[in-house]
Amino acid sequence: MKELTAKFDENISLKDFDKEIKKLIQNFPSEINVLVKVMSQTDCIFVSIVENFDKNALERITWSLAGIEL
């Protein structure tokens, strides 16, 4: 299974975060659905992108948020 990980500064703008995630997702073939796991720490944001094995997923990108206040 292919996995990409990234670490972002906690002060990254949402626009820049979205742009960087899209770049990372391009490393996966377009026919593969991906799971984007976002984990917030006190000083940074960790992201892990893996193939989503949930065959019932309706969208190409599924998000999983941990430690994120909405």
Image (cartoon, rainbow, N blue to C red):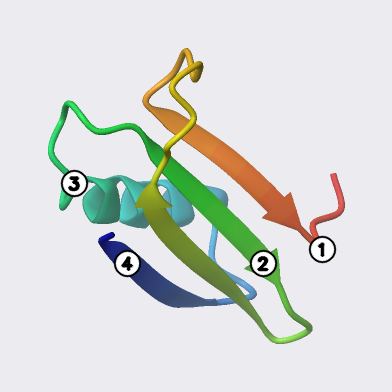
**What's the CA distance linking mark 2 and mark 1?**
6 Å
Look at 54% across and 58% down and name the residue there: 13
Outermost residue to the bottom: 43
* Type of amino acid at the residue the image marks with label 2: Met
**What's the CA distance linking mark 3 and mark 1?**
26 Å
User: What kind of element bears circle 4?
Assistant: strand
Mark positioned earlier in the residue sequence (2 or 4): 4
The residue beneath circle 4 is 4
User: Which of the 4 image quadrants contains residue 24?
Assistant: bottom left
* Type of amino acid at the residue the image marks with label 4: Leu
Mark positioned earlier in the residue sequence (2 or 1): 2
* Type of amino acid at the residue the image marks with label 3: Phe
Q: Residues within 10 Å of mark 1 (few under 14, many from 20)?
A: few
Q: Position of residue 17 (x, y in %)?
A: 46, 56
Mark positioned earlier in the residue sequence (4 or 1): 4
Between disc 2 and disc 3, the foreground one is: 3
Q: Is residue 45 above or below residue 26?
A: below
User: Which of the 4 image quadrants contains residue 46?
Assistant: bottom right
Q: Is residue 30 above or below residue 18?
A: above
Look at 32% across and 67% down and name the residue there: 4
The residue beneath circle 3 is 28
Q: Position of residue 15 (x, y in %)?
A: 46, 47
Numbered mark located on residue 9 in the image: none
53 left or right, relative to 32: right
Q: Is residue 40 above or below residue 35?
A: below
